[in-house]
Amino acid sequence: MPQPRSTQRRTASIAPLVQRLPPHAYFAISAVFHYLGPAFAVLLFARVEVLGVAWLRIASAALVFALWRRPWRLWQRLDRPTRRLLAGWAAVLAVMNSCFYLALDRLPLGTVAAIEFLPVIVLAAVAVRTPRNILALVCAVAGVYLLTDVRLAAEPVGIAFAVANAVLFALYIVLGHRVARSPQVPGIDGLAVAMLLAAAIALPMGITGAAPALTDPVALAAGIGVGICSSVIPYVTDQLAMSRLPRATYALLVSLLPATATVIGVVVLIQLPTAEEIAGVVLVVAGVAVHQVANAPVPSRN
C-alpha cells in the first residue's frame, strides 16, 4: 500500500540529510545517549522506584513516537508475520529496559555496560574474515574483560539482571536488524509501533512504581527527559545506523558502549575508573579503530 503524501514529503525532505551523514555518525550519537539517559535515571532512583523509572522511560518515548509517527496507521497495513516481529521486538524492549535498570540499581554503570556487551561480541565473531577484524575482535574482547572485573559474590542479583539484560540486548540487535531491513516498515515507523507496544507490555511491571511521579512535576519531567535521552534519540539513531551497516559491523562498533559508559559514569555519577578499567577503555577504542568495514555495499531503504 502506498504511503500517504504527507509521509512521502517528510521522507523526501529528510532523505538527503540521512544519505549525507555516514552510518558511523548515527552510531556515535546513539553511543552517547545510550548511557547518558540511564545515568540520569540513576539519579532519579532517589525519587521514583526502579521499575517505575523504567516504565516512565518507555511510556514517554512511546508518547513521543505516537505524536510524531502515528504508528497505528502502519499497524493496520502490516501482514501477520511483520506484526509478530514487531510484537516480539516490543517484548524484548520492555523486559530489557526493566532488567537494565534493576541492574543499574545494584551495579556501577560501566560494569553493567561491560556485561551488556559480552553476548554482542559473539555476533561480531560470526562474520569476522580479515586479519584486521580478527585483531579488532581480540582487542575488544580483552578490553571488555578488563572493564568487567565482576565478582559474583559481590552482587549476584545485580549480575543476574545484568546478564539477562545482555542477552536481551543481543536479541534486540538481531530483531532490530530485521525490522530495519523489512520492506513493510518504512523508516523508523516500526520502532514507533514497537515502543507503543512495549509501553503496554511493561505497564503491569512499572505502573505501581511510577504512580507517585504522576503527581510530582519534577519527577515526571525528569522521567520524560530520561525517556527521550534513553529511548528516542539512541533508538532512532540505532535504526538509521543498522539500516546501513552489516550486523557484524554494527555489533563490533557496539564495543564503544562500555567505554562511553565509563566516561559518562565519571562525569555524571562520579564513578572513577581504576587503572585496569582505563586500560580496558583503551583496548576497546583500539579495537574499533582497526576495524575494517566490509567492502560490499549495504542495502539501504529509502
Image: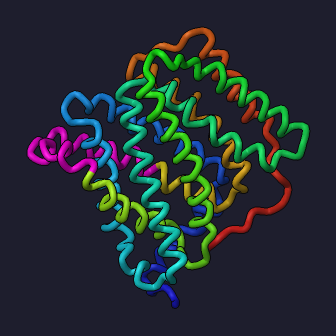
Q: Quadrant of residue 157?
A: top left
Residue 294 x %, y %: 83, 52
Magenta-colored stretch includes residue 215: yes
Residue 158 at x, y percent in the picture: 42, 28
Q: Is residue 86 left or right of residue 202?
A: right
**Quadrant of the snapshot with the C terminus:** bottom right
Q: Residue at x 18, y 39 (%)?
A: 219
Q: Residue at x 34, y 55 (%)?
A: 61
Closer to us: 292 or 146: 146
The kind of secondary structure the magenta stretch mainly shows is: helix
56 horizontally vs 170: left or right: left
Q: Residue furthest bottom?
A: 1
| Nearest to the observer: residue 80 or residue 59 | 80
Membership of 191 in magenta stretch: no
Q: How is the image coloured?
A: rainbow
Magenta segment boundaries in residue numbering: 205-233
Counting from the top left corner in percent of width and height, residue 193 is at 41, 68
The residue closer to the viewer here, 23 or 17, is 23
Q: Position of residue 59 (x, y in %)?
A: 29, 55
Residue closest to the far right? 131
The relative height of residue 138 versus residue 64 in the rendered view (above or below) is above
